Structures are given as C-alpha cells and as structure tokens.
Amino acid sequence: MQPESASIRFLFRTYEGSIDRQTWRTGTLVLAAILIPLTLIWLALAPATHRDLSRPELLDARALFAFVYLVVFTFAVILIAVCWTNLSAKRFRAVGRSGAFAGLLPFAALIDGAAHWFQPRAPDVFPDWALMIFDGVLAAVALWSFYELGLANPAATGPK
C-alpha cells in the first residue's frame, strides 16, 4: 500500500482499490473504537425507552433524550457499516475474492438484529429458539470474514 492511499477517504469512502492485512486491521479497529462506546451509551439509555404510558406525564425528558440518541446511534451504525464494507471490499479484492463479499457481514448483522427485534413481537410465529439460527449464521459469517481478511493470506496486497 502506498502512503498516500491511507487517507480516510480512500479507506472508508471509496469501494475501489486494495489494501494489505495490517491496514484492514487498523481500519477495523478504528471503526470498532467508534462503535463500541456508542453501543455502550445506547445500552445505558435503552431502559429509558420502556415507559409506562399510563402515567399522566406529557413529556418524559429521559425517554425523549433516549429516542433522540437512538436516531443518532442508528445513523452512526449504518455509516460505520458502510465504511467497514468499503474497507473490507478492498481487502477481499486483495485476497483474490469479489469485493461484494464485504457486504455479507453487515447484511447478516442487520438481518440478525431484525430477527431479535421481531421475535418478542410475534413469539407465536417466530419462536425464540429460531434466534439461535440467526445468531449462528451471523457468528459464522463474522468468523469467516475476520479470518479471511485479517488472518489468512498475509502476503496478499492486491493486483500488481
């Protein structure tokens, strides 16, 4: 990888190009360093969204703040998923696979999240044991992606 290609625009905003294993690891760690604190904040705020509607309060400031943060958090998660897809497409291309494989992990994560959201709302048609199937597929895709991009093919740096 050439030094000028390590810019944020190249790594996260464009789909073209190829990168080495260390650059992919560094970019993934940067995205994780952003996502993990945002997720921890959401986990702390999430209980405020479960509000008893029988209370006569017109406005619950904690619930309002939690829902506003949820909008910001959702936008950030989607943006991070797009950045990771762009980063991973470059690495998949470097190891000789189609860059389209980069979308597999974010897609699996979004489907798994949708299943976890849907199951409590329709337990009669979607039993809780079915969530283990979605979780297993997500885990398998994540393990394969991280192995393929971060551990396997150390010398692959893309087309010469």
Image (cartoon, helix red, strand yellow):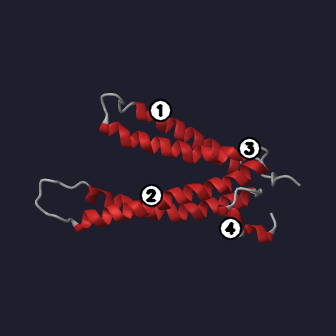
Q: Which residue is drawn at 69% across and 60% down?
A: 14
Residue 52 in sight: yes
Q: What element carries label 4?
A: helix
Q: Name the residue under label 2.
A: 74
Return the residue at label 1: 133
In which quadrant of the rendered view does residue 139 lie?
A: top right
Quarter placement of the C terminus: bottom right
135 vs 63, nearest the viewer: 63
Q: Which of marks 3 and 1 is nearer the N terminus?
A: 3
Report the mark closest to the observer, 2 or 1.
2
Q: Which residue is drawn at 56% across and 48% down?
A: 106
Q: What residue type is labelled 4?
A: Arg
Q: Which mark is residue 9?
A: 4
Residue 84: give x, y in percent of width and height.
61, 56
Of residues 54 and 93, the one drawn nearer to the viewer in this rendering: 54
Are discs 3 and 2 less than 8 Å apart at CB? no
Q: Nearer the viewer, mark 1 or mark 4?
A: 4
The first of marks 3 and 2 along the sequence is 2
Disc 4 and disc 2: Cα gap in Å? 22 Å
Q: What element carries label 3?
A: loop
| Distance from Cα at disc 4 to Cα at disc 3 | 21 Å
In the rendered image, which quarter contains the N terminus?
A: bottom right
- Which residue position holds label 3? 98
